[in-house]
Image (tube, helix red, strand yellow):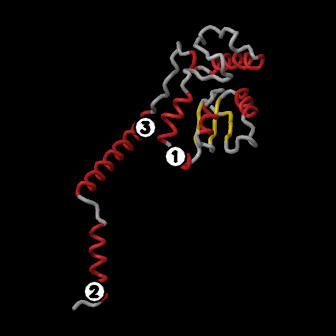
């Protein structure tokens, strides 16, 4: 008859063996490590070669800060005077507006994006949301109402961030932050 200590030792051996990865899991791990090593080597070789940043195409108006400054100057004037739906946008800034809204919802699908894509697939408890290039879109409010209370919304236009801070005061919208960032 085995002693209790010997039985416990056998149980530990069985438990330890059951915790070992299978041959398939080891193969996948090896493949993953090889891919990671390859990516790391590629990154190092590119750094040594001195890879240049991609130049902004000359015909890309929206790639330039001046375009956005002109856009927000026009857009904010329309919001402040409540004539945004009456004013024609500057040349090169044409799109369809929804007259009933006071925000820039470029494609009119922000609510659908939050309700049907973000909310079902992301867990608000996992941490704050970073909303890059927020402009004056309805997304901050839509995220908040969908349960994403911790969120940082950033844009390069200080006048937009100031307007959003007025629109969503911290005491009424706790957890929602706005910052000027590039």
| C-alpha separation, residue under disc 1 versus residue under disc 3 | 40 Å
Q: SS of the residue at dot 2?
A: helix
What kind of element bears circle 3? helix
Q: Residue at x 31, y 77 (%)?
A: 12
Number of residues whose C-alpha sits closer than 10 Å to that of mark 1, classed few (under 14), some (14–19) or many (20 or more):
few
Q: Is residue 127 above or below residue 97?
A: below
Residue occupying the point 59% across, 33% down: 132
Q: CA distance from mark 2 to mark 3?
A: 59 Å
In the image, 58: left or right of 168?
A: left
Q: Position of residue 33 (x, y in %)?
A: 33, 50
Q: Of helix, strand and loop, which one carries label 1?
A: loop
Pointer 1 or 2: first along the chain: 2
Badge 1 or badge 3: first in the primary sequence? 3
The residue depicted at 29 percent of the width and 64 percent of the height is 20
Which residue lies under the disc numbered 3?
48
How many marks do you count on the picture? 3
* Picture quadrant where residue 24 is located: bottom left
Q: Position of residue 155 (x, y in %)?
A: 64, 30
Mark earlier in primary sequence (2, 3): 2
- Disc 2 vs disc 3: Cβ atoms closer than 8 Å? no
For the residues carrying marks 1 and 3, which lies nearer the camera in this image?
1
Q: Which label sits on residue 6?
A: 2
Res. 123 mark: 1
Q: Nearer the viewer, residue 37 or 129?
A: 129
């Amino acid at each position: 008859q085995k002693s209790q200590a010997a039985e416990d030792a056998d149980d530990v051996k069985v438990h330890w063996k059951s915790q070992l990865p299978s041959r398939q899991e080891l193969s996948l791990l090896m493949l993953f490590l090889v891919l990671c090593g390859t990516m790391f080597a590629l990154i190092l070789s590119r750094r040594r070669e001195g890879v240049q940043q991609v130049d902004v195409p000359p015909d890309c108006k929206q790639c330039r800060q001046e375009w956005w400054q002109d856009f927000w100057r026009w857009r904010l004037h329309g919001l402040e005077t409540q004539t945004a739906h009456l004013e024609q946008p500057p040349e090169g800034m044409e799109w369809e507006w929804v007259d009933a809204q006071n925000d820039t919802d470029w494609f009119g699908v922000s609510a659908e994006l939050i309700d049907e894509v973000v909310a079902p697939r992301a867990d608000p408890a996992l941490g704050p949301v970073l909303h890059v290039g927020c402009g004056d879109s309805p997304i901050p409010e839509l995220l908040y109402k969908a349960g994403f209370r911790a969120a940082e919304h950033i844009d390069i236009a200080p006048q937009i961030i100031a307007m959003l801070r007025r629109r969503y005061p911290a005491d009424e919208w706790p957890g929602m932050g706005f910052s000027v960032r590039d």
